Image: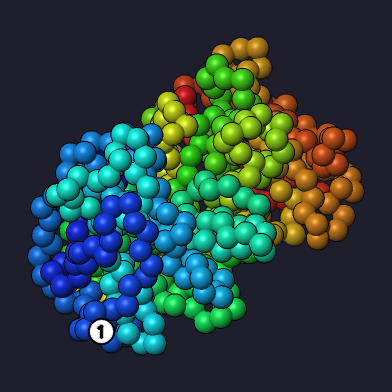
């Protein structure tokens, strides 16, 4: 399975009978207001009702739906699909004194199967009906095909995340179980998703999809938006509860209850997906005017033993799989530490403004591992980095499995080590193809007292190969310490290199770990 086609696979999923929201409320060209529910359309909604629905669905064999999207929509390329825009005047709640309003994505391109949308108000849920009049279709589609079985492929939530007087998108849910968010002043980048199954496994990756969303009407002035989602795929169903609050940190409290159809041995909880094309930590790089191109540059882990780990990302020549065994992790995330424009020199992509995302487990997640998967890519348009928590014990079938966690989207993690951080990793030639020079800049965290008081040393080790000429020098440009060393791999094909900055024999930095591959 080529995971870059994940949405094409995910688009093979649709809702079970009874969740359809067919019908229109306006003719093409019109922008209808939210219509009152027809008699019998409103139904009582409760979390227990949704749990029962998911559990009953899990006891039935998974059935792939018939795809009825007309070719005029299914065959659109990305640029033409992007011309289809929801009309702002049709936004849900735009005329109400709420913190949020809702807009929707059309089906088409890779997003071929509709996602049913429901609005919860006063304990009742009603379907929000698709209408072509809600959209401007742009060229080459003036209007959708007359026989269109289209619909919504996802949801976009607007709020005053950047300026109090402006409603801007801060949360997007579209494609399988993928969703993205931004904090104040940021541009969209890294994604999260509900679940990962068999990622980078020989059996092939599976992409369960959110098949219906229920959005609760907020109270006036309420800062959190509540969304429920029904997940379904060949191996499991699930119920997700999101509480999203935009701000300098956009915080999402997530609860998921999973109902496997079979025993699942390789499941990723709280998966993050990002892009790393090239940067200073790579041994090789393309011919490009930009010094770095990535949405995230490293994986940070705060493990159950209290150790802080920093793992720089790379774009490997072949798939790399790293697993960090742990018990009751305190947190992990894919971070963008380099924030200055000159780190990227790209006016349009705004890589320096893309979010870091931190996963904060709530409760004891037990034993397992934080897995990092790095896939080779030759273009920045593909997400090639995946990180998630993998439970040690398989998820049993005909049982429910509950996980709760909090996602923090922002400029930095909500918690930081008191130890010095590796803010830059550079790798290059030492004048010989058999010698690699590593340069690591450590900078004191704000609460690291005495981290810049000499003398310093560096503890550098490699699983295989030879480390030589370790040195530590003060870097006046950063105000921190620069560690340099040579690595001579010899005939080694792959190994991990570790480095810690020490002061009077005591470690004062996070543990820097680099996967070197021939």
Callout 1: helix, strand or loop? strand
Judge the density around disc 1: few (<14), some (14-19), many (≥20) Cα neighbours within 10 Å. few
Q: Who's the residue at 49% across and 78% down the image? A: 218
Q: Is residue 133 above or below residue 458?
A: below
Number of callouts:
1
Q: Is residue 233 left or right of residue 182?
A: left
Depth check: give the residue in front, 428 or 2: 2
Residue 179: x and y in percent read 42, 56
Where is residue 142? Give x, y as percent.
30, 40
State the image quarter where residue 288 is shown. Answer: top right
Q: 70 or 507: nearer the eye? A: 70
Residue pictured at 60% horizontal, 39% vertical = 351
**Camera-nearest residue between 444 and 239:** 239
Is residue 117 left or right of 248 when viewed as pictured?
left
From what the image shows, is residue 488 above or below residue 34? above
Whether residue 227 is visible, yes or no, is: yes
Instruction: Report which quarter residue 41 is drawn in.
Output: bottom left
39 over 495 or under it: above or below: below
Chosen colour scheme: rainbow
Residue pointed to by mark 1: 43
Q: Nearer the viewer, residue 227 or 108?
A: 108
> Residue 5: horizontal and vertical position, in percent?
29, 40
Q: Is residue 236 visible?
A: no
What residue is at 44 percent from the left and 77 percent from the top? 217
Give the residue drawn at x 45%, y 74%: 226
Q: Quadrant of the N terminus?
A: top left
Question: Quarter of the image holding residue 13?
Answer: bottom left
């Amino acid at each position: 399975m080529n995971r870059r086609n994940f949405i094409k696979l995910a688009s093979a999923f649709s809702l079970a009978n009874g969740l359809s929201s067919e019908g229109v409320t306006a003719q093409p060209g019109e922008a209808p207001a939210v219509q009152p529910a027809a008699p019998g359309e409103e139904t009582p909604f409760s979390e227990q009702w949704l749990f029962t629905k998911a559990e009953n669905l899990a006891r039935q064999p998974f059935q792939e739906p018939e795809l009825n999207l007309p070719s005029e929509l299914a065959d659109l390329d990305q640029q033409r699909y992007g011309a289809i825009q929801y009309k702002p005047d049709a936004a849900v709640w735009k005329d109400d004194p709420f913190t949020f309003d809702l807009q929707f994505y059309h089906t088409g391109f890779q997003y071929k199967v509709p996602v049913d949308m429901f609005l919860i108000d006063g304990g009742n849920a009603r379907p929000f009906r698709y209408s072509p009049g809600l959209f401007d279709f742009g060229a080459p589609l003036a209007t959708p095909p007359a026989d269109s079985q289209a619909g919504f492929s996802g949801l976009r939530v607007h709020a005053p995340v950047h300026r109090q007087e402006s409603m801007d998108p801060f949360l997007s849910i579209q494609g399988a179980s993928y969703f993205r968010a931004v904090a104040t002043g940021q541009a969209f980048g890294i994604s999260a998703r509900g679940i990962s199954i068999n990622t980078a496994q020989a059996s092939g990756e599976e992409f369960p999809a959110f098949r219906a969303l229920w959005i609760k009407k907020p109270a006036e002035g309420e800062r959190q938006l509540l969304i429920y989602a029904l997940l379904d795929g060949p191996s499991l169903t699930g119920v997700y509860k999101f509480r999203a609050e935009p701000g300098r940190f956009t915080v999402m409290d997530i609860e998921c209850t999973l109902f496997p159809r079979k025993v699942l041995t390789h499941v990723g909880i709280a998966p993050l997906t990002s892009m790393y094309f090239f940067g200073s930590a790579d041994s090789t790089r393309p011919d490009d005017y930009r010094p770095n191109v990535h949405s995230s540059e490293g994986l940070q882990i705060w493990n159950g033993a209290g150790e802080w780990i920093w793992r720089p990302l790379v774009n490997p020549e072949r798939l790399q799989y790293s697993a960090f065994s742990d018990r009751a992790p305190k947190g992990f995330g894919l971070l963008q530490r380099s924030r200055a424009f000159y780190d990227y020199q790209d006016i349009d992509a705004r890589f320096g403004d893309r979010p870091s995302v931190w996963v904060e487990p709530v409760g004891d997640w037990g034993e397992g591992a934080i897995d990092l998967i790095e896939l080779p890519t030759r273009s920045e348009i593909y997400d090639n980095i995946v990180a998630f928590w993998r439970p040690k014990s398989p998820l049993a079938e005909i049982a429910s499995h509950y996980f709760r966690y909090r996602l923090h989207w922002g400029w930095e993690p909500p918690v930081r080590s008191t130890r010095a951080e590796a803010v830059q990793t550079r790798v290059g030639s030492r004048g010989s193809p058999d010698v690699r020079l590593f340069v690591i800049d450590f900078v004191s965290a704000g609460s690291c007292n005495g981290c810049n008081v000499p003398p310093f040393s560096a503890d550098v080790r490699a699983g295989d190969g030879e480390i030589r000429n370790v040195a530590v020098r003060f870097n006046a440009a950063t105000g921190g310490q620069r560690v340099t060393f040579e690595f001579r791999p010899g005939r080694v094909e792959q190994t991990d290199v570790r480095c810690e900055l020490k002061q009077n024999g005591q470690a004062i930095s996070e543990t820097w770990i680099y996967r070197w591959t021939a």
